[in-house]
Image: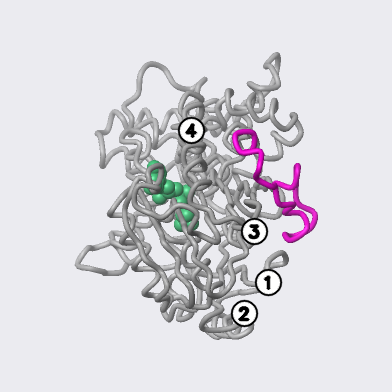
């Protein structure tokens, strides 16, 4: 049991997981934010934190599969919290062999007594004991490939169909399975302050298992604890960032003295990366639509000791009204997108996104690119990136932009980025199964002199 910020933690990890799952389902709250808030509020120890994360993410990741298995045992309509409790318990029974099944059932019954009454507890007991006796049912038997894959991997059928159309069935299936794997924690080394070797040493001294990234020279993979609590993080030697998220700034290739524009900048993961590459010279102008998010960029810059960043809030589709045309050497458009590349970190995306929403995004993305075109100097480089795997938002948006501006030259990223990745017409599409990083898209265009 631990105390923190005056809140008392009563040690019931399953109950806390249930509260988070309920908020995600009922209020469309973000699972990663709720999880972090619970961990911070109660100052959870490593063991409880790991179990809470596993239960919350696991249940959420496999929601549709669990519902399929539970369905034969449920009669009538259930209250939201009871359904969520059954999913949470079934998750432990099916996927967590280290937890004895009867312990998961007993815990569920206790929670049901506390949250409801004896009658509900006895129903929960009955359903889970029948499920334990009969086991999970087979997924197959006359289902279409899309339906079967949808249930097996717990992704909506439309998403599976869309990916199969865009990438072929085999790749779509690999992607859906990769989305249910836990992400690797990775760090970007702040080269204005230190070297990778030094950070590896610091992390090792604190008991973390840290190793150099096999694909990026500035990155570190770390296990064995939350790196945000490390000395290296607190002293501004590193940023917690996915390896794929480091690729857009590699493509942007900023050099000391340059004037760089980051049009969709908050919370500043890439803005600070650019500022580090400028080695605290030149200038990064960072804009985001939401003023409260802009503050996060300032906080990150301060922690990292970066003084070459100027932030402001603005609708970047209208930046030519406040910035001089053709005045930037480099421009990054890390556009708002469907986020289908980061499902491992935010499994709720699978259930909340709709195809209609995706359909509306390319217009916004193209408007941002259009504005960037006018702000780019002759000879300058523009990078377009997203954290999605959707081809409409990625390849098709980039091609439409090129069509509108035939003077632009497409840079061949395969010549300067890691080998063995998926390049198409010089543009890069990372899928979550490729090297363990998020799904990401990066394209770069140069304006002729
Ligand atoms: C993918 S996120 C950016 C992540 C950021 N580049 C990083 O690496 O930390 C996209 C951002 O675009 C912002 N945004 C959305 N529409 C915008 C607009 N019209 N103008 C400026 N920013 C916008 C969102 O608030 C969001 O913070």
Placement of the C terminus among the 4 image quadrants: bottom right
Tell me the distance, in whole angstroms, between the alpha carbons under discs 2 and 3.
20 Å
Quadrant the N terminus occupies: bottom left
Mark 4 or mark 1, whichever is nearer to me = 4
Q: How far, Cα to Cα, is label 2 from label 4?
A: 38 Å
Whichever of callouts 4 and 3 sits on the residue coming sooner in the sequence is 3
The percent coordinates of residue 352 (x first, y second) are 44, 32
The first of marks 4 and 1 along the sequence is: 1
Q: Residue at x 53, y 69 (%)?
A: 258
Q: Which residue is mark 1?
A: 217
Task: Of the two numbered discs 2 and 4 on the same chain, state the one appearing first in sequence.
Answer: 2
Number of the label disc, if any, that sits on residue 196: 2
Magenta range: 402-427
Quarter residue 437 falls in? bottom right
Q: Is residue 6 above or below residue 377?
A: below
Which residue, as the protein is rendered here, is positioned at the far front?
449
Per the image, the residue denoted by label 3 is: 251
Residue 206 pos. (x, y %): 51, 82
Image point (68%, 45%), residue name: 429
Which circle's residue, 2 or 1, is located before the other in the chain? Answer: 2
């Amino acid at each position: 049991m631990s105390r923190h910020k005056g809140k008392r933690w009563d040690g019931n990890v399953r109950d806390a997981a249930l509260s988070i799952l309920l908020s995600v389902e009922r209020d469309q709250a973000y699972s990663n934010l709720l999880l972090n808030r619970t961990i911070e509020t109660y100052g959870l120890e490593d063991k409880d934190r790991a179990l809470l994360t596993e239960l919350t993410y696991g249940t959420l990741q496999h929601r549709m599969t669990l519902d399929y298995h539970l369905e034969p045992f449920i009669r009538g309509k259930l209250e939201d919290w009871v359904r969520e409790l059954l999913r949470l318990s079934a998750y432990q029974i099916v996927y967590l062999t280290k937890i004895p099944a009867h312990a998961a059932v007993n815990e569920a019954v206790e929670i049901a007594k506390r949250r409801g009454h004896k009658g509900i507890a006895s129903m929960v007991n009955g359903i889970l004991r029948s499920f334990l006796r009969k086991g999970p049912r087979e997924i197959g038997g006359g289902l279409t490939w899309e339906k079967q894959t949808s249930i097996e991997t717990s992704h909506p059928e439309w998403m599976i169909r869309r990916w199969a159309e865009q990438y072929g069935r085999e790749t779509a299936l690999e992607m859906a399975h990769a989305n249910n794997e836990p992400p690797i924690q990775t760090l970007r080394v702040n080269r204005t302050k230190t070297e990778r070797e030094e950070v590896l040493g610091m992390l090792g001294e604190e008991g973390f298992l840290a190793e150099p990234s096999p694909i990026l020279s500035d990155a570190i993979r770390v296990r064995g604890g939350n790196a945000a609590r490390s000395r290296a993080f607190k002293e501004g030697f590193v940023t917690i960032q996915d390896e794929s998220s480091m690729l857009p700034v590699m493509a942007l290739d900023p050099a000391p003295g340059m004037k760089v524009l980051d049009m969709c900048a908050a919370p500043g993961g890439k803005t600070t990366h650019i500022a580090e590459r400028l080695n605290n010279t030149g200038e990064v102008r960072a804009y985001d639509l939401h003023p409260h998010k802009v503050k996060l960029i300032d906080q990150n810059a301060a922690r990292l000791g970066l003084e070459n960043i100027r932030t402001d809030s603005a609708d970047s589709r209208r930046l030519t009204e406040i910035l001089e045309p053709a005045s930037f050497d480099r421009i990054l458009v890390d556009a708002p997108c469907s986020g289908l590349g980061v499902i491992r970190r935010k499994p709720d995306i699978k259930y909340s996104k709709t195809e209609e929403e995706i359909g509306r995004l390319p217009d916004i993305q193209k408007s941002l690119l259009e504005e960037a075109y006018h702000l780019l100097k002759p000879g300058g480089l523009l990078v377009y990136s997203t954290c999605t795997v959707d081809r409409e938002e990625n390849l098709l948006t980039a091609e439409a932009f090129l069509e509108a501006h035939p003077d632009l030259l497409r840079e061949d990223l395969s010549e300067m980025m890691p080998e063995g990745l998926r390049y198409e017409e010089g543009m890069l599409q990372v899928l979550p199964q490729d090297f363990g990083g998020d799904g990401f898209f990066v394209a770069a265009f140069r304006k002729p002199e």
